[in-house]
Image (cartoon, rainbow, N blue to C red):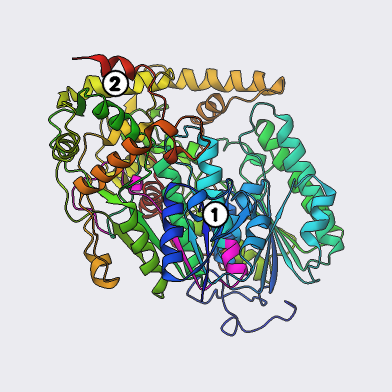
Amino acid sequence: MPVSTSDPTDTPSPGADEPTGVPTSDPASTVVVTGASGWLGQNLTRALVGRDRIRCLVPAEGEAAPLALVSPTIEVVVGDVRDPATADRLFEGVPAGTTVFHAAAVIHPHASTREFFDVNVGGTQNIVDRARRAGAARFVHVSSNSPFGVNPTPDDVFTEDSPYDPYLGYGQSKYEAEQIVATAGDRGDLATVMIRAPWFYGPYQPSRQSQFFRTIRRGRFPLVGDGSQRRSMAYTDNLVQGLLRAEVADKAPGNAYWVADAEPYRLRDVITTVRRALEAEGLATSGPELLRLPLSLTGAKLAEKVDVVLQGRGRYLQPVHVLGELRHTIACDITRARDELGYEPAVALEEGMRASIRWCLDHGEQL
Amino acid sequence: MRTVLITGGSGYFGSILSELALARGDRVRVFDLNPPGDGTASRVEYVAGDVRDVDALRSATEGVDVVLNNVAQVPLAKDRELFWSVNVTGTANVLLAARDRGVAKVVHTSSSAIFGIPESNPVTEETPGRPLEAYGRAKLEAEHLCHDAAAAGLDVTIVRPRTILGHGRLGIIAVLFEFIAEGAPVYVLGSGDNRYQFVHANDLADAVLRASDREKPTTYNIGATEFGTMRETLQAVVDHAGTGSRVRSLPATPARVGMQGLATVGLAPFAPYHWLLYAESLWFDTTKARSELDWQPQHSNASALVESYDWFLANRDGLEGEHRSHHQSPVRLGLLKVLKRLP
């Protein structure tokens, strides 16, 4: 049971080689992970191997066996995160004192924005309720930059004190999910921690993400404006480290933290760094280093307006959404995670992108 | 006496593997959608089941010492979902059942399709997989699952065969035999100078069984040691047949486009693997298998293809109408009949 505060040097510090320098408790021997077969979930679940029991929720039967293979300590439950009976099965036999990592969410729904709310809000309520009844010791919630919208000025960075300003359907749903988690935390039902992750990248990426590499490789990723807008990004291993710190750091309960790579990147640097990473992994690039299109800014503004109208009618089109968001700065400051969680991002953009590219190639993706 | 579970044991290669395992004195249990053929039916235990059903696999794996995993949805089945669920999820299920039942050794049959068109030859066990189409991608993903299972303590070895030949082998090869038997010309793409390696099913089965005797997870690339170009291999069987058939060249690019076009509209029995690889060189360095497993292939490219052809001739009349796996059934020629009538 993770109860007593101990000397950090006595505590195995999960996910990092060095002591965290902040007071921590022992990690839980039993953990519950939702969204375990997803992009982040795969990375997190693999990092948790070594715990006594890892109870995982996946949405489809076909995703169960590949995950279960990774370790005999992984127990996979198949079901819908929105379904209370599924939550009962997920927590069946799970002892009090467990840590729950809630990573299940919809980011690009198939067509309707309804899914955002059903899954991201309803699913969170369902898992929070069940975790509380199971006597979970800590609930680590994966949140997003989306409840905060975009930075008001290009040199602004979000801190934990920035005001909410949800960006469209996804942002609103993740905002409501944060409210559910915060309420449970405030009531004293659960020790909750929220980890706000921006745009992330890394192994186990879904196939749709290969398009990002293909487009940049061929010089077809449009630079919107002059490309000086900044983006915080999180390499999956960095993010996993943040989640594992959130589990054990004594100061964490009741708080939310931005977790990302050390510094935000200018969008133009993201593009040129990815091209360098592709070259370094033996993939020749073509086309212009930076694709400047006339009216790119107007196009992005237009896409944003179209996105707003569509989502107002409950419709979702991924390319429109992505293009619409591109012109903005979405940057955050990780100082608080460093100070209170002992979080220290170990991987930066080029190294992380190279690892992602290698992973894609090793899994037969054609970039 | 050890008990060996052969998944896909009623299929083309699975049947031959069953036969060799029986000959070695193994007790053989076959897990397959279809019952085993007459050759082995009375000597093996048959469990009907689908690899997509992990519970069926768990019960089939009870009391089993060794699992030889040969289930695959081969390139001729062009359904992507099916590729994935059988080749990937199915493999995960087999590995999981083996682990849960404490099976001592698993040998997983992979495919050279994971290499796509290699940058250079020979391809070794260290060459990274870079598949070009859905079948190769699914087989590569299955290998990753084997590595995951091995990292978690399961003893699983991967065997990657080149294109399998031998008595009873039909599928896409039957197109070729049909042409040769009728005295019609057979075609290579371009010059046909690409070095293309086959492996005889018996040689492969021997390698799989030898791999099953050896502890610790590893990988072996398996192919004939005597092989030449595609043109030489076809020439050997044309000479053997003596039907007046000749080897002809088709310009590679238009032929590829034609194969793809005909396949897309369902008029010819090709899958992407065929038009991508037929004119390319792909051959394995088999040093590792020969030295670690003391394995020596008995067949060359030519002798394997000749044997397949002779079997085809002897059994040609009885082939239609039987309901067997893709590699045990002749494909429908479709529009290729037109090619056959060319002088």
Mark 2–mark 1 distance (CA, rounded to whole Å) = 43 Å
Q: Quadrant of residue B82?
A: top right
Discs 2 and 1 share one subunit: yes
Q: Is residue B114 magenta?
A: yes
Residue on which disc 1 sits: B41
As helix, strand or loop, the secondary structure at mark 2 comes to helix
- At x 26%, y 29%, the residue is B181
Identity of the residue drawn at 67% across and 30% down:
A168
Residue at x 25% of width, y 43% of height: B305
Label 1: which secondary element = helix
From what the image shows, is residue A131 above or below residue A290?
below
Q: Front-most of A150 and B242?
A: B242
Amino acid on which the number 1 mark rests in the picture: Ala
Question: Is B165 on the left or on the right of A250, as rendered?
Answer: left
Q: Position of residue A282 (x, y in %)?
A: 25, 46
Q: Earlier in the sequence, mark 2 or mark 1?
A: 1
Camera-side residue: A4 or B273?
A: B273
Labels 2 & 1 near each other (Cβ < 8 A): no
Residue type at tag 2: Val
* B278 in relation to B144, above or below: above
For residue A152: magenta?
no
- Residue A62 in the image: state x and y as whole percent: 62, 47
User: Which mark is nearer the camera, 2 or 1?
Assistant: 1
Q: Which residues are magenta?
A: B96-124
Which quadrant of the rendered structure holds the N terminus of chain A?
A: bottom right
CA neighbours of label 1 inside 10 A, class few (<14), some (14 to 19), many (20+) = some
**Lateral position of residue B316 relative to residue A171, left or right:** left
Which residue bears the numbered disc 2?
Answer: B257
